[in-house]
Amino acid sequence: MTDPVSEDDGNDDSASDERGGGVADTPAVGSVEAFLEHLLDPGVLAARRLAAGITPAWRKVSSDEPRWQVSLVLAIAIVLQIVLPRHLTIRPHWLLPAVQGLLLVSLLTLNPGGKRRGSSLLRTFELIMIAVVSLANAISALLLIRSLLRGTEGSDAVGLLRNGGSIWVTNMIAFGLWYWQMDRGGPAERAKATREYPDFLFPQMQSHELAPRDWRSSFVDYLYLSFTNATAFSPTDVLPLTPRAKLLMMLQTVVSLCTIALVVARAVNILR
């Protein structure tokens, strides 16, 4: 698909660099002064590129995003919920995994080619899938916390760590899916470049010299964001920009912190 902003990215970059970024009384984008200033503030060079009319790849119309990564992690989440003991799931034990499996089959049927289609039906199925996974995992986390507080979880440290780890990994997958669907309206809207401002600021958006010219965020980037937020309990290299992104990351941090703190504390107590 042809980029509505420019026909040739390489020519635009070089021409704009020669014009000195198109901003009066400022160093040229490719000059030493701009590079030194970029080291102090990574957003300066990116802002000047935009002012010069150089559109970054992540704001351009792009091809559809492959979906095999999403299907794989959804399958992993379903398996993790199946192997949880019955007292940590709602009854019947097979209900939510079966619903998730049906929705996953429906998604693959609606999209047999493995790439996204910008249909509202497909996005609805994806959101339902993520909501079901999140609901099932939230219930398991609450049941685990209740068992730990009541002291009824048992004396098997290995089993406790296994159950807590399964819930933690599923929580990471669920929030990675939420981030993937939320940022700039989801993968379909990102491919169409219909929304100007992102929900998350990736390092590649600021430091174009450290990323390929055609870099765009993919599901792996959002899964990594979810992993770092669940382990560090705070943003690392990816920053939330919108209120909904900040609230979602806060919610994930609370769930992850409660799960890890209680499970590890109980496991250590058992081992003693």
Image: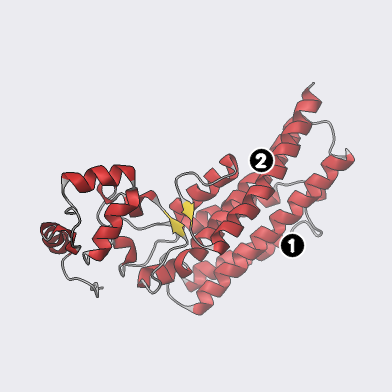
Q: Is residue 131 left or right of residue 221?
A: right
Mark 2 or mark 1, whichever is nearer to me: 2
State the residue in front, 16 or 71.
Answer: 16
Neighbour class for label 1 at 10 Å: few (<14), some, many (≥20)? some
Q: Is residue 51 left or right of residue 101?
A: left
Total label count? 2
Residue under label 2: 165
> Residue 68's spot in the image, x, y percent?
45, 58
- Position above or below: 210 against 136: above
* CA gap, disc 2 and disc 1: 22 Å
State the residue in front, 95 or 157.
Answer: 157
State the residue in front, 176 or 59.
Answer: 59
Tell me which residue sits at (24%, 42%) in the image. 36
Tell me which residue sits at (70%, 47%) in the image. 83
> Residue 77's spot in the image, x, y percent?
61, 52
Query: Secondary structure under badge 2?
Result: helix
State which quarter of the image contains the C terminus: top right
Which comes sooner in the sequence, label 2 or label 1? 1
- The reply to whether residue 192 is visible in this rendering is yes
- Position above or below: 146 against 121: above
Q: Amino acid at mark 1?
A: Leu
State which quarter of the image contains the N terminus: bottom left
> Residue 103's spot in the image, x, y percent?
60, 67
Question: Which residue is the extreme one toward the bottom?
Answer: 120
- The reply to whether residue 116 is visible in this rendering is no
Q: How is the image coloured?
A: secondary structure
**Mark linked to residue 95:** 1
Tell me which residue sits at (50%, 78%) in the image. 120
